[in-house]
Image: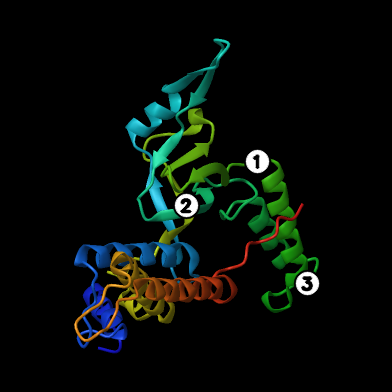
Amino acid sequence: MAKPASREELKQYCLRKLGAPVLEINVDDDQLEDLIDDALQYFNERHFDGMEKLYLKHKFTEAELERFREENTIHTSDDGSEWEERNNYIELPDHIVGIERVFSLSMTALRSDFFGFGNQYFLMDMFSLNAGYSLGNVDLVNYYMFKQYFETLDMVLNSGAIIQCRFTKRNGKLFIDYNPKVLQQDNYFIVECHRLLNPADAPKVWNDWFLKRYVTALFKKQWGQNLIKFNGVQLPGGVSINGRELFEDALREIDELESRMISDYELPPLDAIG
């Protein structure tokens, strides 16, 4: 069908774009499956619709706390000196590819709990009899500026609401740079992260304009590569096979699509400020 909604439908769609069943596409089914996997990986890692932002909540287990507090890895340099590395990490699911921030659920005196300084200041200001305020004429601009000031103080004083962390997607371990002495079993924290978009949960991925054309180009490249060794062989009727031309055509299409990915579909890198 013109709008593939599954992996098999995408495969058949791309084969038809190359001429099947009128032409015999000389590519093994295992090769086709590998190429779809390669295209999905490229789509997930580069396309702005290939991943999604979400928040995950995790509760510390006793085994994780023991590793945080006791287990360390010792590295020895060439001169024999020893270097100790803390194993302060937790394992993340495979589909997580990026971490932005880690939040603690603990409240601080400056933050959003009801008895925090910010809320108490607002309540005192709003119900001040001397100022003659009512709910309808509270100076929200003034309150907003004070809230920003409190947030800045909270960040400078390192109150623990935002936790320093390190993550590499090829490792799959989230290292949390936090004082293990204040952690307790069943403590929660929230991770702001990005995960790969799973086509099983979002079947509209199979009908993506870029993915359909990219998979077709990869199929065409593999077809030409399979036929290169028969280049110049005469078939009955005087027709000759030219796998090299098919292969080079596919390379040009792939280069064009990857250039469009950079210009049209890939999010630009954010500038570092400060």
Tell me the element at label 3: loop
In the picture of the structure, the residue carrying the numbered disc 2 is 191
User: As drawn, is 48 to the left or to the right of 209?
Assistant: right
Q: Nearer the viewer, residue 236 or 57?
A: 236
Q: Quadrant of residue 211?
A: bottom left
Q: Is residue 262 above or below residue 34?
A: below
The mark closer to the camera, 1 or 2, is 2
Q: Position of residue 83 (x, y in %)?
A: 54, 18
Report the residue at 48% width, 56% height from top.
193
In the picture of the structure, the residue carrying the numbered disc 1 is 158
Q: Nearer the viewer, residue 29 or 115?
A: 29
Q: Kindly identify the amino acid type of the residue bearing the numbered disc 2.
A: Val
Q: Position of residue 58 (x, y in %)?
A: 39, 47
Asked if one can make out residue 259 in the rendered structure from this viewpoint, the answer is yes
Q: Position of residue 222 (x, y in %)?
A: 33, 68
Q: Which image quarter is the N terminus in?
A: bottom left
Report the residue at 45% width, 71% height from top.
251
Q: Kindly identify the amino acid type of the residue bearing the numbered disc 3.
A: Gly
Q: Kindly identify the amino acid type of the residue bearing the numbered disc 1.
A: Asn
Q: Is residue 112 above or below residue 246?
A: above
Q: Nearer the viewer, residue 64 or 9?
A: 9
Q: Are marks 3 and 2 in contact (CB under 8 Å)?
A: no
